[in-house]
Image: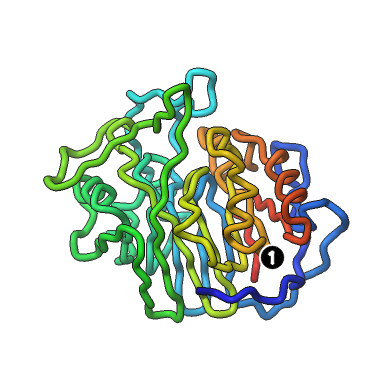
Amino acid sequence: MTRTPDPTPAVRRRGLLKGTGVAAVAATAAGSGIAVAQQADTAVRLRWLGTNSWEFTTETATVLIDPWVSRFPTGAYTPEGADPETEIEVHQDVIDEHLPKADTILVTHGHWDHIADVPYLAEKTGATVLGTETHLNLLRAMDAPEEQLSQVGGGELYRFEGGYTVEVFRASHSAGGEHKQITFGGTRPGKVPKRPKKIKDLVEGGSLTYLIDFGTVSFFNAGSASFHEREIDGIRPTVLFIQPGGGYTPDYVERLLAATGYPPYVVATHWDDFDRPLTEGAEIGADWKPLRDRVAAASPDSEFLLIDHLEHHDF
């Protein structure tokens, strides 16, 4: 487990979020001031590629969570929601442009906006891919290299070349509606299914959360607005990723902050309208401002970070 570091490291102010008219700030969650410039000698560079797609880079390693940059339109943030009949697209030129390398790829669940680009990216980079049996079967069906796939289910703690560890935790995807159903729920154990062609074919397949520890800084990421409180109780990450939502998960934000020890940093994730191009400034799909306010109320000493598409923050 990661020990809590000094909660007052230097941070810097982000630029203006294009297309939103709001400042991307690295100030306190309470919004009480302009952050000061960071020191030049940083250990880990964090870069946002939209949705829950994050790149962690050091001098010796690149780790990716849910790398998906193809961003084809589905109607996800329309009143009707994502069209399940949408054909899956993999834009190799976009992947090549924005994701040149990877050593480890972590899959939180099997939905298209988390997994569809992984097979091409794994083949291109040779990265190890962690995921559940269903995630890996879906990847196999999309021609991911078998020898690079590592099945996990929660409880694993792995050390990788490059000086970092990855700890895996069981989780659940957020559910909605009167009957608390998961969009495109289901599993694909055992036999590899037919190649997925539409986004409805990429089922959730079980959810995972990950603690990535680089020694001087650690990151805890959940790919959905839900988590297993007893699984993660006692971990102390430097950086916690939280997404808006969780309306059917009681006290989601407050409980997650408490379970992780009120981390020094909170990063907003998976809030952009991912029907929009990655090269444009992030546009709000799920409003991050109520999330900021809840973090400020529950953990006023945490820095709330809002990062734009393709921008980075150094730790």
Q: Position of residue 102 (x, y in %)?
A: 40, 65
- Farthest residue toward the front? 230
Q: Nearer the viewer, residue 265 or 97?
A: 265
**What residue sits 60% from the left and 50% below the top?**
255
Which of the 4 image quadrants contains residue 90? top left
Q: Position of residue 240 (x, y in %)?
A: 59, 59
Q: Using a 10 Å C-alpha cutoff, classify the residue at mark 1 as few (fewer than 14 neighbours), some (14 to 19) or many (20 or more).
A: many
Q: Nearer the viewer, residue 164 or 113?
A: 164
Question: Would you say 262 lies left or right of 29 here?
Answer: left
Question: Would you say 195 lies left or right of 18 here?
Answer: left
Q: Is residue 197 above or below residue 258?
A: above
Q: Quadrant of the C terminus?
A: bottom right
Question: Would you say 4 lies left or right of 10 here?
Answer: left
Q: Nearer the viewer, residue 75 or 28?
A: 28
**What kind of residue is marked 1?**
Pro
* Residue holding disc 1: 264
**What residue sits 55% from the left and 70% below the top?**
218
- Farthest residue toward the right? 33
Q: Nearer the viewer, residue 156 or 15?
A: 156
Q: Position of residue 141 (x, y in %)?
A: 19, 45
**What residue sits 53% from the left and 22% below the top?**
78
Q: Is residue 91 above or below residue 64?
A: above
